[in-house]
Image (cartoon, coloured by chain):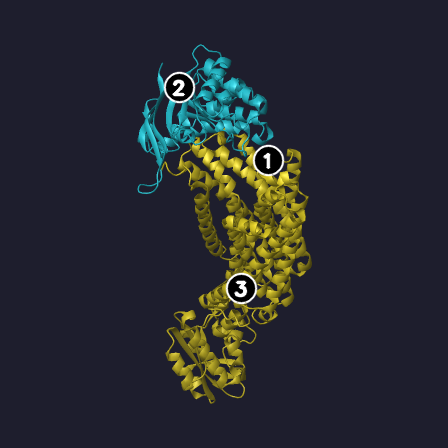
């Protein structure tokens, strides 16, 4: 298995030197291999969002390194970081982050046109991923004209259309009703298992986390335990997870 | 308690309030500035000495336009105020505040904001009017006597108009707030994008827009006597035509570009086009106003500058800079101060019947004259030598020209004689000296002094004075200064209003754009790409009304044929000045906008 993501001794401290400082991350280490589906779980204030911002190169660690596809983010300048994000990372956010002034098709086209993919190839690529996610019928509509679950599928299509090295999902089901949430999680699992898409999801929801093959627990800025699904079914993994959370409290 | 909350709400949104307030201040200031000219009878009567009814009509046109512009502007400002406060007031209502009380609050808030802004606008109007007037009068060397920056009538009408507008606005806001369900007040931001017009309807609108504009432009070219028809028809057709054109034509164009995927699927063009599509729809009214303001500002400056060319024409129609017939010491002393380029003197003797000139003096130095003709629609003059033989023939151009250089009591048949004959003739010895100077503008005060001194010495000089260059120059200057002043003054006023309107509208949309740019950045768009997108987007919002505004001016100048012999003469000068100002203003808006949407306390700039 090839390694896609390596996080080494990452710390993040807020506040200037000499003033009152707050350490959000206290030395995080982990790796994600190609084709893995990893969830990072933690309560609010545990450092989840800070970690995700650093992984997605939107924020820089105070110390430590993040390698994606063996490339060290900290050596890149602003333009290289932007290019890196557009090529290597696909994002799904809790609140979809779709541009409401573009149609769904145009939203999905953006990562491709940003990379300068030839205009003739763009529509076929969109149609393929839309077919995969079952959103062909709503491509001509605007985000405001479709449901929350459909929006998140469009966001997933946008995140995956350029075949990034890793899909980063930040509470992707947070704004969805339980039926849509379930559908999205099934789709993400399917994409991971059948298309081999490496996925890293940050969530506080045990149900969502139970779809992953490995769960890392983050608490007070440190990765504590990790749980492996192994041969367990999703339900069994979910119950195990609930038990773990109960005993951990 | 509610009052306190309401005030805190204002404090929290201080920045937005500043944008709103300053926009309103500028609107009332410009309105006031315009009125100081438009309803100042003393100024119109004394500084603009021309057919008054025509001028009054032009101003009537201006006032109606300005009222329309201000009304649309105020409607925008009002809905901005409401949208700013909706969420707060919705929350108070959710917590149990009575809707009648909330209605009263928004009513008073709108009205008080409006009246405060109007008062501030008028006071600033005093200052700005003084400064602009002084600058223009000094810089352009104008003679404007009946212009006063503080005009009670203008103060009153500005107050009345704006108070009424805000009263309506306040009532509308209160009604809207009371009748909107609380849930909509709280969640209004999430409403879906408006669905656009059907293609068929849009093409009808596009054609209607262009036809209306064509009718408007055609009307402007009608003879000036039809002013009663020209102004109302042009007003309605051009305003409505611009609106329809923006609403249909340009959004159709953007839709077309969006469909051309080999064009739109490059970089973030699709986003820029999406923003514009969003905007064009939302901005139709504002773009219409901007195109009108652009036309008014550019038109005013062009006409103002064109009036200054009347002065050049006054000097171009006469070849000699002065005619000297007096040998008094005062005149001769003044003559010594001139920077003379060429001087020629003709001697003559006057008896009871005739004036006898020396033929030889004319042969040595022919009298020159500037002849008027029209070249490519612009007036021009060519210098010719008067025919010596004609000088003595009554009724010829040469004879008339020579006569106009002689004092009135000397108007007798002219005879040209040889040197010997002249010496033998009896009569009063007289002379006429014709001068050209190196720089007329520079010597103009001395030249005028010479002319006036000669007039003082003899009333018979009056006819020479009338056709003298300095005299004509002074006359035209009196006439054109008023117009020139007005042109530049109004041009400046409209430009300021244009600036505030477009900036106001663009900046009010910046808050929601900020999120979009943040998303694009997170997706991996380079900062430089984002900056370019902003430049293109705002550039098009500036360009579209600019183009329509230029077209408006090109047709609108026809209206001024009454006082201007060639309204299109040297058009590039005002256009260049104006376009440079417009570009500068565009760059400032881009910078301000970038500061709002790209600067953020979040992660956006940390990568740089």
Residue B163 as seen in the image, left or right of residue B454: right
Q: Separation of disc 1 and disc 2 at Cα?
A: 45 Å
- Residue hosting label 2: A226
Q: Where is residue A234 in the image (x, y as percent from the top left)?
A: 49, 14
Tell me if residue B376 can be seen.
no
The reply to the same-chain question for discs 3 and 2 is no
Q: Nearer the viewer, mark 1 or mark 2?
A: 2
Tell me the colour chain B is drawn in.
yellow
The dot on residue A204 is: none
Q: Which residue is depicted at the point 48% across and 65% down?
A: B131
Badge 3: residue crowd in 10 Å (few <14, some 14–19, many ≥20): some
**Chain of the residue under label 1:** B
**Chain of the residue under label 2:** A
CB-based contact (under 8 Å), mark 3 and mark 1: no
The reply to the same-chain question for discs 1 and 2 is no
Image quadrant where one finds the C terminus of chain B: top left
* Vertical placement of residue B240 versus A10, above or below: below
**Element under disc 2:** strand
* Vertical placement of residue B542 versus B25, above or below: above
Tell me if residue B441 can be seen.
yes
Residue B362 as seen in the image, left or right of residue B100: left
Q: Which of marks 3 and 2 is in front?
A: 2
The reply to the same-chain question for discs 3 and 1 is yes
- Residue hosting label 3: B123
Question: According to the colouring, which chain is cyan?
Answer: A
The dot on residue B193 is: 1
């Amino acid at each position: 298995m090839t390694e896609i993501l390596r996080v080494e001794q990452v710390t993040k401290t807020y506040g200037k030197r000499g003033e009152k400082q707050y350490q959000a991350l206290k030395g995080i280490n982990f790796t994600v291999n190609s084709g893995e589906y990893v969830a990072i779980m933690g309560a609010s204030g545990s450092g989840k969002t800070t970690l995700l911002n650093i992984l997605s190169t939107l924020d820089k660690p105070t110390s430590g390194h993040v390698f994606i596809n063996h490339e060290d983010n900290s050596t890149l300048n602003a333009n290289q970081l932007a290019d890196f994000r557009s090529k290597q990372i696909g994002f799904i956010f809790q609140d979809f982050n779709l541009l409401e002034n573009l149609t769904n098709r145009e939203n999905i086209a953006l990562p491709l046109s940003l990379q300068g993919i030839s205009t003739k190839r763009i529509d076929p690529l969109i149609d393929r991923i839309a077919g995969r996610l079952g959103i062909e019928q709503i491509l001509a509509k605007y985000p405001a004209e479709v449901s929350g679950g459909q929006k998140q599928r469009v966001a997933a299509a946008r995140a995956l259309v350029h075949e990034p090295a890793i899909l980063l999902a930040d509470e992707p089901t947070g704004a969805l009703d339980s039926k849509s949430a379930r559908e999205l999680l099934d789709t993400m699992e399917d994409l991971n298992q059948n298309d081999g898409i490496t996925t890293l999801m940050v969530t506080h929801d045990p149900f969502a986390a139970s779809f992953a093959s490995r769960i890392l627990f983050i608490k007070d800025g440190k990765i504590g335990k990790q749980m492996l699904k192994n041969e367990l079914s999703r339900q069994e993994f979910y119950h195990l997870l609930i038990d773990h959370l109960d005993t951990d409290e | 308690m509610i009052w306190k909350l309401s005030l805190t709400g204002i404090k929290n949104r201080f920045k937005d309030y500043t944008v709103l307030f300053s926009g309103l201040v500028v609107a009332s200031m410009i309105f006031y500035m315009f009125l100081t000219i438009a309803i100042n009878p003393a100024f119109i009567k004394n500084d603009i000495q021309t057919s008054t009814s025509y001028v009054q009509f032009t101003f009537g046109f201006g006032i109606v336009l300005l009222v329309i512009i201000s009304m649309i502007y105020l409607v925008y400002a009002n809905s901005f105020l409401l949208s700013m406060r909706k969420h707060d007031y919705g929350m108070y209502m959710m917590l149990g505040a009575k809707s009648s009380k909330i209605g009263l609050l928004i009513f008073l808030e709108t009205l008080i904001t409006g009246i405060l802004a109007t008062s501030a606008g008028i006071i600033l109007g005093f200052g700005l009017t003084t400064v602009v007037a002084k600058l223009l009068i000094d810089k352009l060397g104008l003679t404007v006597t009946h212009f006063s920056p503080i005009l009670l009538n203008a103060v009153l009408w500005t107050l009345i108009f704006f108070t009424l507008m805000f009263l309506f606005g306040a009532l509308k806001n209160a009604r809207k707030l009371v009748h909107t369900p609380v849930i909509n007040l709280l969640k209004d931001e999430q409403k879906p994008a408006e669905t656009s017009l059907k293609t068929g309807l849009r093409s009808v609108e596009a054609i209607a827009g262009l036809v209306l504009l064509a009718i408007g432009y055609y009307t402007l070219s009608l003879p000036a006597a039809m002013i009663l028809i020209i102004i109302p028809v042009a007003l309605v057709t051009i305003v409505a035509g611009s609106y329809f054109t923006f609403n249909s034509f340009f959004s159709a164009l953007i839709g077309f570009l969006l469909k051309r995927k080999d064009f739109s699927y490059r970089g973030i063009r699709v986003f820029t086009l999406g923003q514009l599509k969003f905007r064009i729809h939302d901005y139709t009214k504002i773009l219409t106003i901007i195109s009108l303001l652009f036309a008014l500002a550019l038109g005013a400056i062009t006409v103002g500058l064109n009036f200054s060319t009347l002065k050049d024409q006054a000097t171009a129609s006469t070849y000699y800079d002065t005619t000297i017939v007096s040998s008094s010491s005062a005149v001769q002393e003044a003559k010594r101060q001139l920077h003379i380029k060429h001087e020629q003197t003709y001697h003559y003797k006057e008896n009871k019947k005739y004036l006898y000139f020396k033929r030889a003096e004319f042969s040595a130095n022919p009298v020159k004259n500037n002849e008027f003709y029209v070249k490519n629609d612009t007036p021009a003059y060519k210098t010719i030598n008067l025919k010596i033989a004609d000088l003595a023939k009554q009724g010829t151009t040469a004879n008339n020209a020579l006569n106009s250089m002689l004092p009135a009591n000397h108007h007798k048949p002219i005879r040209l004689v040889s040197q010997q004959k002249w010496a033998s003739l009896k009569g009063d010895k007289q002379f006429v000296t014709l001068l050209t100077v190196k720089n007329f503008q520079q010597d103009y005060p001395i030249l005028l002094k010479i002319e006036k001194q000669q007039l003082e010495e003899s009333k018979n000089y009056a006819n020479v004075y009338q056709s003298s260059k300095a005299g004509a120059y002074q006359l035209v200057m009196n006439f054109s200064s008023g117009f020139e002043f007005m042109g530049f003054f109004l041009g400046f006023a409209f430009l300021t209003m244009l600036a505030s309107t477009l900036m106001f509208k663009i900046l009010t949309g910046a808050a929601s754009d900020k999120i979009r740019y943040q998303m694009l950045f997170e997706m991996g768009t380079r900062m430089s790409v984002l900056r370019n997108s902003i430049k293109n987007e705002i550039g098009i919002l500036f360009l579209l009304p600019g183009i329509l505004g230029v077209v408006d001016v090109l047709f609108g100048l026809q209206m001024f044929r009454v006082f201007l012999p060639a309204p299109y003469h040297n058009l590039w000068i005002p256009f260049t000045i104006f376009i440079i100002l417009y570009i500068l203003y565009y760059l400032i808006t881009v910078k301000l906008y970038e500061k709002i949407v790209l600067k953020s306390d979040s992660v956006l700039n940390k990568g740089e």
